[in-house]
Image: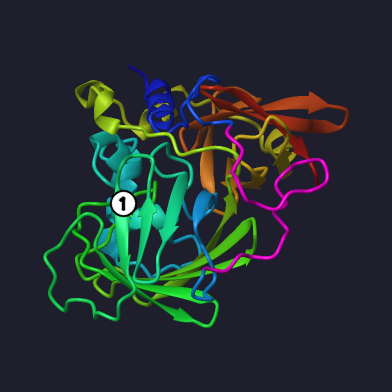
Amino acid sequence: MTASALAILTVALSTPLVIPVQAQWLNHPTPGIPRTPDGKPNLAAPAPRAPDGKPDLSGLWNKISPKYSRNIAADLKPGEIQPGAEALVRKRKEDLGKDYMNVLCVPLGPGYSTDADSTGAEMMKIVQTPSLILILNPDLTYRQIFMDGRALETAPNPSWMGYSVGHWDGDTLVVESFGFNDRTWLDHDGHPHTEALRMTERYRRRDFGNLELDVTLSDPAVYTRPWTVSVRAELAADTELLEWVCNEKSSEVEHWIGKASDEKKSEVKVAPEILAKYVGTYEEQPRLWRLVPRVVEITVSGSTLFADMDGRGKTPLVAQSETSFSGLYGLGVEFLKGNGGPAELLVKHVSGDYRFERKK
């Protein structure tokens, strides 16, 4: 099996399922929500409040985190990640992510907060009570956030999902978590953490349909400073959570024998003046992969073309021809020629080609 095929398989394992139209409750109107005159959910309506006066975060939410789901450390500077951790990330990329949690059928742990493009984590259902908040995930994992005033244990038994306590800071829910085992990655790229990881989340429901989330991570054994990433979620109205059980599939990891660097075996040389024509910013066109369009920025340095999708960080592309390249997080890229240069590019995925239009 070639590295290209393995990369496509890797992405396919984290691809949202195609849900049959007849699946139960997927088109069931959510009762009691504000609607516009044409009957659509009014996501801009004021945020609701619970009977105790606190903001009500209850609901089914689609997480939107195109940047940090892939690279949680996208905003860190060189030297702010310990060398051993950087080497481990490189190794995991070279191995095509075959030890990623969704492949091994284990929970994502702290990664659920920012993950948004894998089948078991792109949605979350929040169930809110005054003393306990539950977060349910499609892969049948859950989190308990205790709101009864208890303190976090100082030496908890490490677990997949850790331990969480919360309190209200005005209209913001603040969640402190600790006690994660070190068997999970913080993102798809493979950034590690130790059992010393502490995570602070701040949830704010801006209006009826939008939830803002700031996540601060601290793990001094791996990262030289705490840092905060911001993601958001959009209310998924008129539908329902559908379970996805990882252990029902056959991973057949023993057949994943390729390496990411195998792509270079078929690399061809492309003249710098041709590569220079591809430089620009490309925006995804309908049909979209997620709720919001992805953006790919193409740059060139010397004889190498680089792509940065959604600010995750530059990744080198490997030329397979003058117009076709591999290496975009396991995806292929093809530039389509127009008058005076490429007018668009295709991001090639196992589910089909996604069209990106050049904006500048």
How many numbered markers are drawn? 1
Please identify the dominant SS of the magenta region. Answer: loop
Residue 260, given in percent of the width and then of the height, sits at 37, 33
- For the point 47% across and 44% down, the residue is 122
Q: Which residue is mark 1?
A: 142
Q: Is there any visible trace of residue 53 in the rendered image?
A: yes
Q: In terms of image quadrants, where is residue 159?
A: bottom left
Residue 307, given in percent of the width and then of the height, sits at 59, 44
200, above or below 207, in the image: below
Q: In terms of image quadrants, where is residue 130?
A: bottom left
- Callout 1: SS: strand
- For the point 30% across and 26% down, the residue is 258
Amino acid found under the numbered disc labelled 1: Tyr
Q: Quadrant of the N terminus?
A: top left
On the picture, is 2 further left or further right than 279?
left
Viewer-proximal residue, 217 or 342? Answer: 217
Viewer-proximal residue, 59 or 262? Answer: 59
100, above or below 265, in the image: below
Viewer-proximal residue, 249 or 275? Answer: 249
Viewer-proximal residue, 30 or 125? Answer: 30
